[in-house]
């Protein structure tokens, strides 16, 4: 299922801060209905999120738009950096606590520590990206529930 995309070429500002000419994902009630029931492709980091749901106030639309955009823009660098720091600490302990201490480690031990650091950092970044996607999906499901409740009250 592809997302509804558009672009704002006129730069009118009616899209609550979405840059002119940038592709955007337009979140509508029908998009929410579909996205909360089946897997959708995750928006690209270069795409902007525009919430266009009539039952929400302007402030709510802007709040949801910012929340969803934060998940789209998350690159996983925070968890990657945390993993990097932890892996460096673990590698240092491995290198200095090994038999013979700092004087005994050679290229093989140093190389294995470096590979360990790189793998853990990549895993941390991948975890951060996966977490952002899961949070985006959870937010879509939550927003869909809110919209359905409000639409039911109006009828």
Image: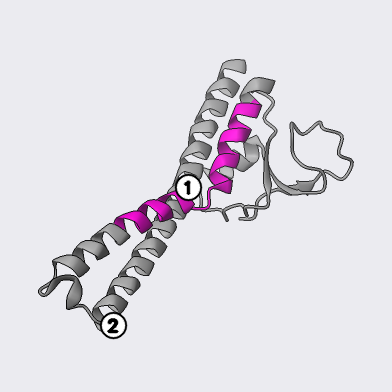
Crowd band around label 1 with a 10 angstrom C-alpha radius: few (<14), some (14–19), many (20+): many
Q: Report the residue marked by disc 1.
A: 132
Question: What is the C-alpha distance between the residues marked 2 and 1?
Answer: 37 Å
Residue range in magenta is 61-86
- Whichever of callouts 2 and 1 sits on the residue coming sooner in the sequence is 2
68 part of magenta stretch: yes
Q: Position of residue 146 (x, y in %)?
A: 53, 26
State the residue in front, 20 or 119. 119
Mark 2: secondary structure: helix
State the residue in front, 135 or 29. 135
Q: Quadrant of the C terminus?
A: top right
Q: Is residue 45 visible?
A: yes
Q: Report the residue marked by disc 2.
A: 107
Q: Is residue 155 visible?
A: no
Nearer to us of marks 2 and 1 is 2
Determine the residue positioned at 61% across, 52% down: 43
């Amino acid at each position: 299922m592809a997302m509804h995309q558009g672009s704002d070429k006129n730069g009118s500002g009616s899209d609550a801060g979405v840059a002119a000419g940038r592709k955007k994902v337009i979140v509508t009630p029908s998009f929410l209905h579909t996205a909360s029931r089946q897997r959708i492709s995750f928006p690209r980091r270069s795409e902007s999120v525009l919430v266009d749901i009539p039952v929400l106030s302007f402030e709510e639309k802007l709040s949801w738009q910012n929340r969803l955009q934060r998940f789209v823009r998350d690159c996983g660098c925070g968890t990657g950096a945390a993993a990097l720091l932890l892996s460096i600490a673990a590698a240092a302990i491995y290198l200095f606590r090994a038999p013979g201490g700092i004087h005994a480690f050679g290229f093989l031990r140093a190389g294995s520590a470096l590979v360990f650091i790189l793998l853990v950092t990549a895993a941390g970044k991948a975890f951060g990206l996966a977490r952002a996607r899961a949070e985006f999906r959870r937010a879509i499901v939550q927003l869909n529930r809110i919209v359905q409740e409000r639409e039911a009250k109006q009828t």
